[in-house]
Every structure is written in C-alpha cells, then in structure tokens.
Image: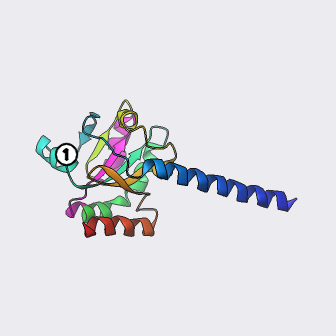
Amino acid sequence: MLIPLFLSCNSKKKEMKEYIEKELILFLYSKISIEEVGLIPVNLTDSIMMKDYLSSKYKIYSFVDSMDCSSCQIVRLRKWKDLFKDLNSKLSPIIIIFNTQDVLNVKKYMDLYGLDFPYFLDFENKFKKVNKQIPQKGIFRTFLTRNDSIIVVGNPINNKKIEKLYRKEISTN
C-alpha cells in the first residue's frame, strides 16, 4: 500500500514542477504596470516622492491578495524591515500592494509591528486586473522588476538564494 502512495507523491511533485515551469515561462520578462492602476499610496509623503518611487529602475513587488489573511501577511512583513532599509538605500523600492477592503486592519497591524515603509491599497483588485499575467499561486506574488520587466520571481525573505539573486541583480546594473 505504501508504493502507490509514494508514486502518487512523486506524480504530484512532477505535476507541480511542470506547472511552475510553465507559469514561469509565461511570467518572466513580462511587463508590470502600476502607474495607471490607481492604487492608494500610504506613507508616501507627496506626489514627487511617489513618482521617484515608481520610476526606479528596480522595484520589488509583493502582492497580498484579499484571500490571504491580511494580519498573517503583515506579521510576515516584519521580516522585510531590514531588507527594505538596505535595498531602499540602493534605490530599489519595495512595493507592497494589499488587495483588501479592510483598511483599518491593515493600518492597525502595520502600526502595531512598526512597519512604516510605503505600501499601496487596492480596493478593487485593479493591480491583478491590469497585470493579468500574474499567476494565482502565492509563490508568484513577490518578484523583482528591471524597467518594469519581471526578472526574478520568489520571496527573498523566505529564501536566501532568492535574496542573493535580488541583491546580485540590483548591484550589478
């Protein structure tokens, strides 16, 4: 009875790997659009700062979907604090986008954990609607862009190898 279970696990791993590879082929190097989306910025003090922020050569995007537990995601964002300070000093903004109606909860937890970096609110899921190429799976919700083209996919907080890739890309160009 153990053999079919083992084969089933291997089959599922293979299917997942094939799915990820297929999605990456479609996703990598696609263009991300943010400016015409109409997101609401929080902790960006003026329109000049916002324009500079959004016109940076490199940007790290992390998209928090409304289906995710916002407070759970914000707890994970605490890990971004040091990376944000370091990469933001290299002019690589981290753009956190919350697709949520629960603004008070997001603000409460961001304040509670001392997360004072800029983030954006997307009440109507416009970011996903404009950027249809973003796959549904959560593993694709954090990525690095160069000139608005996706060049690295994955969360640098969860994976040191991906963090190294982000840093390498940002520092070599």
Between 43 and 21, the one lying in front of the other is 21
Residue 7 in sight from this viewpoint: yes
Mark 1, secondary structure of its residue? loop
Residue segment shown in magenta: 88-115
Locate residue 23 relative to residue 58 in the image: left or right. right
Q: Which residue type does callout 1 highlight?
A: Leu
Label 1: few (<14), some (14–19) or many (≥20) C-alpha neighbours in 10 Å: some
What residue is pinned by disc 1?
44
Q: Is residue 114 magenta?
A: yes
Between 110 and 162, the one lying in front of the other is 162
Q: Residue at x 32, y 42 (%)?
A: 107
Q: Position of residue 8 (x, y in %)?
A: 76, 55
- Residue 133, picture quadrant: top left
Q: Position of residue 51 (x, y in %)?
A: 16, 45
Between 54 and 84, the one lying in front of the other is 54
Locate residue 114 relative to residue 22 in the image: left or right. left
Q: Residue at x 48, y 52 (%)?
A: 24
- Of the 4 image quadrants, the one containing the N terminus is bottom right
Q: Is residue 99 magenta?
A: yes
Residue 113 in sight from this viewpoint: no
Q: Position of residue 47 (x, y in %)?
A: 13, 41
Task: Give the answer, above or below, for where 162 lies relative to 30.
Answer: below
Q: Residue at x 25, y 58 (%)?
A: 92
Q: Position of residue 68 (x, y in %)?
A: 48, 42
